[in-house]
Amino acid sequence: MSILDRLRLSGHLDDAALAAIWTDAAAAGGQPTHPHLQACAGCRSRFASFASWLTDLREDAAGQVDELFPPERLAAQHAQIFRRLEAAERPARIIAFPKFAQPLTSRTSNGSRWIAAAAAAGLIVGVGVGQMMDIRRSLGGPAASAGPGSPAYVQLANNQRPDRPELRTISANGREEAFLSEVDVTLSRPAVPELRALDEFTPRAGEPAPKVH
Amino acid sequence: MTGAQAAGVSGREADGAAASAVKAMQADGRHAEARERYAELVGRHQRRATRIAFHYMRDAAEADEAVQDAFVKAYSHLSSFREELPFEVWFTRILINGCLDRIKARTRRERWIAPMPEGPGGERDFAERMPGRSPSPEDQLLARERREALSRALARLPERQRSVFMLSHFEGCTSREVSALTGLNESTVRVHLFRAIRKLRTLLGNSGDAGASVEKRRVHS
């Protein structure tokens, strides 16, 4: 049973019925033509106040927007729309890489150039000398620090301990050839007595292969 | 036929003619002329579009942007406009879809970003600080309260009911026009309109009753 049918039975129009009548009239775009409204003055007046409440709502809503969007703001909006349209139609611009107002080289003087070159040269020399010192130190060990030309005999390890084999002392008198050959001789002999027997069996590179009997 | 309806029909004819002319100019590459002619359409629909956008967005700045986007989009897609459909309907659909997209984006954004606190007077937009035209501060205050109550009530309506109510009542569209704009059946439009009015009546009526009861309590005390 619809609202309008119910109101026929009950008599007067309630809010829902008024809303239904108003909706039908608004949808059709005309005036309400309900028979009860024609007959009942009370309901007609309630419908009028209902319609006027809805009109107030519309006016409030319109007033709010009008207050927020005065003609100046609408004009600004209009202008902004056409700026955007123009921008959208223009072909895309390629922006060149920004040029410097002055060439970069003109800012540096000759003096600062010399300072930079000297600093770079100093750095290179420093690194090179440091490398050389490291190499010499690694070759000569602590004896290298004694200075070239001076006879220095270095005990390579503490030989006071009885469990360690006796280590030979080597001389480092500055002559590298002699020093290196001494190192070779020392390394060619097994230092650990337990391994000497094993070493006898092991062929060395450069030695002729043992003859098999 | 009433005067308004006759004006509407003649307006629609003028819209159709202007839209066709702009379309032809765009096709010929006469862009400056096309823009000039399009300005006529913008001027005719701008205020209404702003009203609709504001009722959807409830924020002046966002409504402004939504209207701009809709006009730019309509201009650039005018080649797809079919003359048998009124320009107003075609354009309003673009606008409403844009507003709904913005609302979705805003909802997503608000899920992650904490809202900024409003100013001391609750002002959010420069236009809201513009002086009103009401004669007295009391009237201004009452009008503001009424509008805020209406805004709150509208915000509590389901999205479809709100759309139908706004288009039917605020914009004066018939149910057939609302149906064309929203894609709903005419009968569904009527049902949504009826439900929207009832709910508004309840929401605004209850707040009015509450106000009256507070007033009564004050008098008795």
Image: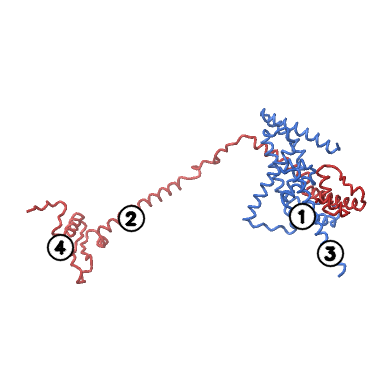
Query: Are dots 2 and 3 in contact, CB under 8 Å?
Result: no
**Residue under pointer 4:** A196
| Residue A47 at least partly seen | yes
Q: In the rendered image, what is the letter of the chain coloured red?
A: A
Chain holding disc 2: A
In the picture, the disc for residue B213 is 3
Pick out the residue farthest to the top.
Answer: B28
Instruction: Let me know if marks 2 and 3 both belong to one chain.
Output: no
The label shown at residue B127 is none
Local secondary structure at mark 2? helix
Q: Secondary structure at mark 1?
A: helix
Give residue B89's quadrant in the image. Answer: top right
Task: Identify the hue of chain B.
Answer: blue
- Circles 2 and 4 on the same chain: yes
Nearer mark to the viewer, of 2 and 4: 4
Residue type at the position of mark 3:
Ser
Which subunit holds the residue at mark 4? A
Q: CA distance from mark 3 to mark 4?
A: 115 Å
In this picture, residue B177 sits left or right of residue A18: left
Amino acid on which the number 2 mark rests in the picture: Gly
Between the residue at mark 3 and the residue at mark 1, the CA separation in whole angstroms equals: 20 Å
